Amino acid sequence: MPGYARLVKLLKSADSVLVLGHQNADPDAVCSAYAFSLLAKRVNRKLKLSFASPDGVSKLSNQILRAVALEVVESPDPSNVDLIVTVDTNTLQQLGNLKRPVLDSRKPLVMIDHHAPHPENVKTATFVICDDRATSTCEMILDMHAKLHIPLSRAASQALLIGLIVETGHLTIATRRTFHSACSLIKAGADPEPALAITRSAMDDSERIARLKSAQRLRMERIGKWVVAVSDVGSYHASAARALIALGAHLAVVAGKRNDELTVSFRSTREFASETGLHLGRDLANPLGIKMGGMGGGHSTAAGANVKGEVDQALKLVLRILRDYLAQPTKANTVPFGNAQAPSQTGVTTQE
């Protein structure tokens, strides 16, 4: 609650707020930004709010913006607002070309995120509201409404349900808390049928080809009882990693380089996360980012990293980090997957 109280104080004292999502903002970022903006207006009706995402929003987010009335500002000026709030953004590196203007503005910066806490954030943000037991930032914004005793509008409920559905892979990685949140949103006026309909999109040929190429190029490693698939492809790394999991891998790592940017995506099964205690964001993506001059983070079963170097170098390093982790017997079964609690019991870490 201390983080929420301080956030309310900042909102009440501000005239203008810039809400930022990460690069190529996904539906969780877009929908949580919209619902947060409505909440902020309830705290301070005179607030002027704007939303921006470096390099625009994702293809699916563009589709969802037909149902979520959020305007995306193309060229925001962080120095021209009183407060900056990031949503669903694990580190400021994910702000791309907006990172430096945000830091140079010296404006109060609040980060609201559900990924594993990144140590760099405490150095750059005024404070961080982080709940890595939430399966989406949308769940956090729902919880924020409850904690601040601000009723949910039907529009905010619909947006939060859409973001929650997408972020959990249409509830395939949902926890007990996720279902509790979905029920709360429906009771507040959200309609699940159009929410489900708008979050489905046909796979285009380029994504299909990327998935097939990743399967064609995959190298399989067996580490103990676990089947690990590594591959490389030029684009759609996350989609390719999901496809390799569907093929039967316990853990999939897909890397690809375009120009000077090397992207690595990680996906794992619930079984792997539960039995090993390995958190992909904290234990693989983040160490890889540190060792290869970039950044990484994410969830227990889905994560990513943007680093410098070559594909083979990154994949070899990932396997080395993985083997070292799994070789430690004390690591096994220490962090059970899906231990998020119902909203009444949830813990929010505030970093200041």
Image (cartoon, rainbow, N blue to C red):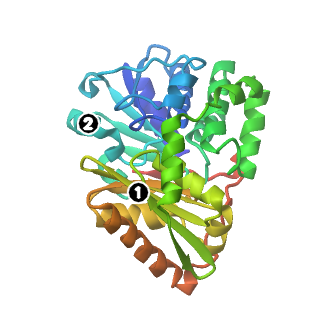
Q: Quadrant of residue 154?
A: top right
Residue in the picture at 45% in, 17% down: 71
- For the residue pair 245 and 208, the one nearer the viewer reads as 208
Residue of label 1: 255
User: What amino acid does circle 2 point to?
Assistant: Asn
Tag 2 residue: 97
The residue under the point 56% across, 65% down is 251
Residue 327 image point, x, y percent: 51, 85
Q: Position of residue 55 (x, y in %)?
A: 34, 31
Q: Is residue 206 above or below residue 73?
A: below
Q: Which mark is on residue 331? A: none
Location of residue 300 by image quarter: bottom right
Q: Secondary structure at mark 2?
A: helix
Residue 150 locus on image (x, y percent): 64, 27
38 or 249, which lies in front? Answer: 249
Q: Amino acid at mark 1?
A: Ala
